Image (tube, rainbow, N blue to C red):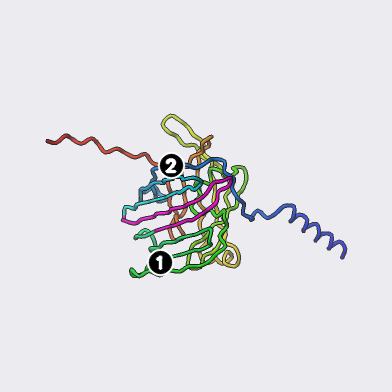
């Protein structure tokens, strides 16, 4: 009996000394965000371009605003506006997502107010809106809309766990397990660049997490590549844009100038 108690105490001590890796953590600011405008293309996994867009970033004081925008060839639209602060650590302020058109299973809009914990979701069926609002204890370090930014700042030598709000009529907190993986070499003309590759696994907690794989609702892994540099830069993402999309690929692209037009009288 005494031996069993000693083993139990030993196990408890180990748990206290080495906390679960599932515990979320804040990401320190290693690279200050500022003003950015990047040209993007969205492709299927087999390389077909389906949308073009941009990632725009502006800052005012300590508040940074990101906008990820895609215009699809079929007329669909994806627009995500994320606001956050970066005083020592990245802190989500708000996240707004609009998706509409045939590229998505359902037209929808969602708003996350991190400070007040208000999650609002508006869906449309037969042109009629349905809006729900719920209260949720949103972690200040929620990763919504911040994956590209966080990937430039997290420790590339170990796994990082971040919370994220799954915005829906019944919102919940899920965990993003961001793990380093083998990078790849990319080329810019004759210049060779090395990248840091991260694999992002979404883990749903509780009974829902056990059932999700059985029902085919487990989110697929996402992948992100960052150029290794004193100024790390996003170069590629592969994963779903939202909960109801297939795996797509986001890549940087170079805008092409219009061909010179012949002079007309």
The residue nearer to you, when weighing 19 against 186, is 19
Q: Quarter of the image holding residue 11?
A: bottom right
Q: Quarter of the image holding residue 156?
A: top right
Judged left or right of residue 50, residue 221 is right
- Looking at the rendered image, the quarter that the N terminus falls into is bottom right
- Secondary structure of the residue carrying tag 1 is strand
Judged left or right of residue 207, residue 222 is left
Judged left or right of residue 106, residue 89 is right
Residue, disc 2: 36
Above or below, 87 relative to 228 = below
How far apart marks 1 and 2 lie (CA) works out to 31 Å
Q: Residues within 10 Å of mark 1 (few under 14, many from 20)?
A: some
Q: Are marks 1 and 2 in contact (CB under 8 Å)?
A: no
Residue positioned 59% across, 63% down in the render: 205
Image coordinates for residue 150, horizontal then vertical, percent: 54, 47
Residue 123: mark in rendering: 1
Residue positioned 51% across, 61% down in the render: 166
Q: Is residue 95 rendered magenta in the image? A: yes
- In the image, the segment drawn in magenta is 74-98
Single out the mark in the foreground, 1 or 2: 2
């Amino acid at each position: 009996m005494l031996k069993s108690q000693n083993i139990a105490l030993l196990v408890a001590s180990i748990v206290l000394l080495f906390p679960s890796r599932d515990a979320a953590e804040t990401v320190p600011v290693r690279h200050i965000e500022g003003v950015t405008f990047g040209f993007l293309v969205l492709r299927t996994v087999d390389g077909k371009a389906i949308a073009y867009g941009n990632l725009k970033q502006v800052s005012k004081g300590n508040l940074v605003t990101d906008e990820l925008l895609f215009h699809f060839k079929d007329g669909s639209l994806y627009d995500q506006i994320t606001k956050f602060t970066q005083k020592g650590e990245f802190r989500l302020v708000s996240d707004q997502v609009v998706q509409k058109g045939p590229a998505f299973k359902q037209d929808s809009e969602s708003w996350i107010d991190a400070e007040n914990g208000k999650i609002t979701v508006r869906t449309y069926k037969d042109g009629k809106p349905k809006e729900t609002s719920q209260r949720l204890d949103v972690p200040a370090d929620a990763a919504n809309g911040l994956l590209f930014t966080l990937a430039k700042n997290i420790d590339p030598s170990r796994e990082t766990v971040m919370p994220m709000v799954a915005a829906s009529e019944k919102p919940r907190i899920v965990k993003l397990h961001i793990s380093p993986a083998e990078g790849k070499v990319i080329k810019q003309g004759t210049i060779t660049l090395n990248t840091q590759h991260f694999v992002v696994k979404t883990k749903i907690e509780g009974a829902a997490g056990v059932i999700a794989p059985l029902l085919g609702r487990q989110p697929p892994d996402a992948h992100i590549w960052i150029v290794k540099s004193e100024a790390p830069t996003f170069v590629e993402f592969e994963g779903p844009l939202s909960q109801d999309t297939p795996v797509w690929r986001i890549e940087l692209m170079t805008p092409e100038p219009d061909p010179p037009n012949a002079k007309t009288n």
